Structures are given as structure tokens and as C-alpha cells.
Amino acid sequence: MEDSLIFKFNLKILSKIEFLKLVYCNIFMRMYYRIWQIELGAGFKFYGLTIFRRYPGSSIKIGSNARFRSAPKSNLIGVNRSCIISTNCNKNAQIIIGDNCGFTSTVIGAFESIKIGNNLKSGANT
């Protein structure tokens, strides 16, 4: 009986810690995407650190309600790296991602243009 109570108590503490990690990660990511001049729609969530790299003059636009899962425990399949969204070596390169998209450990790199529509879910480690 006591072990069960201790387990439930520890589970509550862990869930609060996970919640705080999510909140602070999202606050950090908001500052991070502003530095990199990434256009993000409303309602986005980051689980772990998503890496953005925007070549000067290029653009990255992400629609509303996007989800980026980079934390090891954020997906049951498993995550082997952070999400990376990058424009490369071309000032006219662009990445446009629609609304309600989800990415788990996904790498997207554009030398010219990548356009992703709404409601796309990218599987883990793609």
C-alpha cells in the first residue's frame, strides 16, 4: 500500500516537472525563433529543442498548431535527433509549412523551395 502511494506521489511530481519543462522549452523556443526570424503561427508546441537555421534572405514560415517533437520521450517510436528546419546557401530559399502539421525528429532542408500543405504528420526520424 505504501509503495503504491509513493509511486503515485512521484508520478505527480514527474508530471509537474514534465509540464514545467514543456512550458520553459516553449518560452525558450519563442525567443529562439524570433532571433532566427522564423514566422510561426499561433498554437505551436515544441517538445525538446527544434533547430532552425535560416540562410540570410531566405524564409521559413510555419502555420498554426504545429507540433515539433525532439525530446527522447515525446514519441513512443523513439527520437534519435532533434527536428531540424533549415534553408541552405540560397537567399531565395523558402520553407512553408501549413496548419496542423506534426513532426517527430524530422529534418527538412531546402536549397530552393519546400511547401508542405495542411494536416501533414511526419513519422519519427524522417
Image: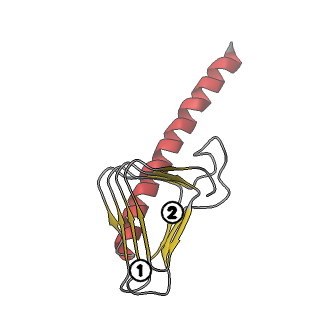
Labels 2 and 1: the sequence-earlier one: 2
Determine which residue is flagged by label 2: 50
Q: Position of residue 43 (x, y in %)?
A: 32, 49
Crowd class of label 2 (few under 14; some 14 to 19; many from 20; radius 10 Å): many
In the picture, the disc for residue 93 is 1
Using residue 68 as the reference point, say whether residue 74 is left or right of it. Answer: right
- Residue pictured at 40% horizontal, 52% vertical: 66
Q: Quadrant of the C terminus?
A: bottom right
**Which is more toward the observer, 97 or 12?**
97
- Residue pictured at 38% horizontal, 56% vertical: 117
Q: In the figure, 32 relative to 18: above or below? A: below
Q: Position of residue 47 (x, y in %)?
A: 51, 52
Using residue 97 as the reference point, say whether residue 121 is left or right of it. Answer: right
Q: CA distance from mark 2 to mark 1?
A: 19 Å
Where, by quadrant of the figure, is residue 26 drawn? Answer: bottom left
- The kind of secondary structure element at disc 1 is loop
Colour setup of the view: secondary structure
In the picture, the disc for residue 71 is none
- Residue pictured at 43% horizontal, 78% vertical: 54
Amino acid at pointer 2: Thr
User: Marks 2 and 1: CB-CB under 8 Å?
Assistant: no
